């Protein structure tokens, strides 16, 4: 029973204080907790889910095609999870609901719901990436995504 309810002495209070300080530091500066709201990443991430975002994941290298990234949106308190579909210099388009990158159709096994998007080809500007959610069953205009600046990438979800 002593393990569950330790004797409150100086050593125990120091341990509790250090544990709280480390937890706050980790959750504020490294692994930021994020609640998932909305259906834009279905079926990869469920609505009302929870994950942690590693804010140092892309410190030394940029995201790659296929990565899921957390993006700053509407200030630093709101994050969006999106999948990277194209990198700077790539040409991206949607034909009949199929993603085409650099003139080749892309196999996207993570997109489970049907899509009928039609978007003209566009070349991604330097310092930018092209992102979109995995749930493509709703109209393109309903999605937040597209070409975004790399500086808006906050990190990568852990789970």
Image (cartoon, rainbow, N blue to C red):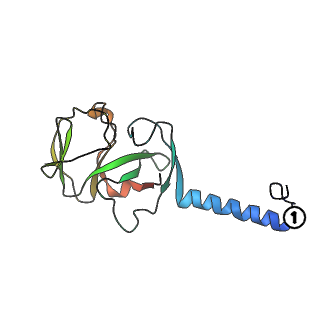
Q: Residue furthest left?
A: 103
Question: Residue 116: image x %, image y %?
Answer: 22, 32
Height in image: 86 above or below 98? below
Along the horizontal axis of the image, is 18 left or right of 30? right
Question: Residue 50: image x %, image y %?
Answer: 52, 44
Q: Residue at x 17, y 35 (%)?
A: 96
Mark 1, Cα crowd under 10 Å, few <14 / some 14-19 / many 20+, is few
Question: Residue 132: image x %, image y %?
Answer: 31, 44
Q: Quadrant of residue 125?
A: bottom left
At mark 1, the secondary structure is loop
Q: Residue at x 39, y 38 (%)?
A: 43
Q: Quadrant of residue 118?
A: top left
Q: Quadrant of residue 128?
A: bottom left
Question: Residue 126: image x %, image y %?
Answer: 23, 59
Q: For this rendering, which residue is in front, 67 or 146?
A: 67
Q: Residue at x 31, y 40 (%)?
A: 111
- The quarter of the image holding the N terminus is bottom right
Q: Residue at x 70, y 62 (%)?
A: 19
Height in image: 120 above or below 63? above
Q: Which residue is mark 1?
A: 9
Q: How many marks?
A: 1
Height in image: 104 above or below 48? below
Q: For this rendering, which residue is in front, 127 or 111?
A: 111
Q: For this rendering, which residue is in front, 29 or 75?
A: 29
């Amino acid at each position: 029973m002593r393990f569950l309810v330790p004797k409150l002495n100086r050593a125990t209070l120091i341990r509790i204080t250090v544990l709280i300080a480390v937890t706050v530091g980790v959750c504020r500066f490294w692994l930021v907790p994020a609640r998932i709201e909305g259906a834009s990443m279905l079926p990869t991430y469920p609505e009302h889910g929870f994950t942690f975002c590693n804010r140092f994941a892309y410190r030394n290298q940029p995201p790659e095609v296929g990565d899921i990234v957390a993006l700053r949106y509407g200030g630093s308190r709101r994050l969006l999870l999106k999948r990277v579909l194209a990198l700077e210099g790539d040409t991206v388009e949607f034909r009949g609901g199929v993603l085409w990158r650099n003139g080749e159709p892309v196999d996207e096994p993570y997109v489970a719901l049907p899509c009928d998007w039609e978007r003209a080809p566009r070349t991604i500007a330097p310092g930018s990436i092209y992102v979109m959610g995995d749930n493509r069953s709703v109209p393109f205009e309903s999605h937040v995504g597209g070409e975004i600046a790399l500086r808006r990438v906050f990190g990568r979800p852990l789970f």
